[in-house]
Image (tube, helix red, strand yellow):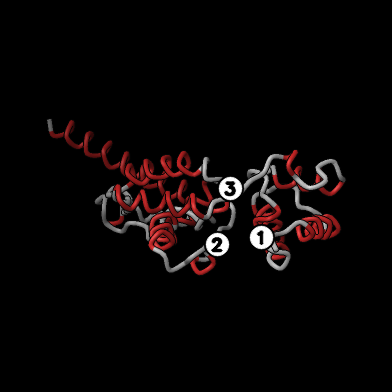
């Protein structure tokens, strides 16, 4: 009987050791999920969680924006977006998706947060907060156009613009920004493409796209 108990104990300790090895290997520099041998102690903080998620999904998430660069950054919607979305990944720009796309995207995110709440220290927004977040994202969402609606849609630069931008999102309306704003936006998109492993436009292509967008930008 005693030998059986010793065998069971040895097997249990071996299983715990293998679990710890697996956790350490899978999470790289974040092996503190079960510090002290108890779930719920030594949980990863938000920065660690964000880093882990980004490493698990290379090429899927753009670098994101700073809270102060969000539209109407002091609004309740911007504050809630920063609070909840930055728990697991970089802060998304509302212009990542159109108003029609955002509700489907956030439902997936809300479901994941609810599943991870408590277990991994992730907060999940209340129903009221969810409505505020969705309304905020739709208000400042990407204003897209159909390819046929672009100015001079068959021109060389228009075709280039369609090919480049459609790699990551819906086609943005040139009137979404002013001629002063577009150069900074295009440069940020170029950096995002590089971070996500997409084909990066050349300096010449960037100048062509900026000139095209600036010529048809919002006045």
**Residue 197 at x, y = what percent?**
68, 48
State which mark lies toward you, 1 or 3: 1
Answer above or below: position of 98 versus 205: above
141 relative position to 192: left or right? left
**Residue 116 at x, y = what percent?**
34, 45
16 relative position to 214: left or right? left
Q: Quadrant of the C terminus?
A: bottom right
Cα–Cα span, label 1 and label 3: 29 Å
Evaluate if marks 2 and 3 touch, with contact meaning CB atoms under 8 Å apart.
no
Q: Quadrant of the N terminus?
A: top left
Residue found at x 71% / y 53%:
174
Which label sits on residue 58?
Answer: 3
Q: Residue furthest left?
A: 1
Q: Is residue 18 visible?
A: no
Give the total number of marks visible in the rendering: 3
Q: Earlier in the sequence, mark 1 or mark 2?
A: 2
**Residue 9 at x, y = what percent?**
22, 39
Answer above or below: position of 139 versus 19: below
Which label sits on residue 209?
Answer: none
Residue found at x 75% / y 48%:
199
The residue wearing badge 2 is 65
Cα–Cα span, label 2 and label 3: 17 Å
64 relative position to 8: left or right? right
Tag 2 secondary structure: loop
């Amino acid at each position: 009987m005693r030998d059986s108990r010793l065998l069971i104990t040895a097997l249990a300790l071996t299983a715990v050791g293998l679990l710890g090895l697996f956790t350490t290997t899978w999470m790289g520099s974040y092996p503190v999920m079960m510090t002290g041998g108890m779930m719920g102690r030594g949980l990863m903080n938000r920065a660690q969680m964000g880093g882990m998620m980004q490493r698990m999904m290379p090429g899927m998430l753009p670098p994101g924006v700073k809270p102060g660069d969000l539209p109407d950054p002091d609004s309740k919607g911007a504050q809630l977006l920063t609070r909840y979305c930055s728990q697991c990944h970089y802060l998304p720009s509302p212009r990542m998706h159109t108003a029609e796309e955002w509700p489907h995207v956030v439902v997936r995110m809300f479901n994941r947060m609810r599943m991870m709440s408590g277990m991994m220290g992730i907060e999940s927004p209340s129903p009221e907060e969810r409505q505020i977040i969705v309304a905020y994202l739709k208000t400042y969402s990407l204003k897209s156009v159909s390819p046929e609606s672009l100015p001079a849609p068959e021109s060389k630069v228009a075709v280039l613009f369609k090919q480049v931008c459609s790699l990551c999102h819906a086609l943005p309306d040139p009137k979404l920004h002013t001629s002063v704003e577009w150069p900074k936006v295009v440069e940020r998109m170029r950096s995002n493409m590089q971070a996500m492993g997409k084909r990066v436009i050349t300096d010449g292509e960037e100048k062509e796209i900026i000139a095209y967008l600036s010529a048809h930008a919002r006045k």
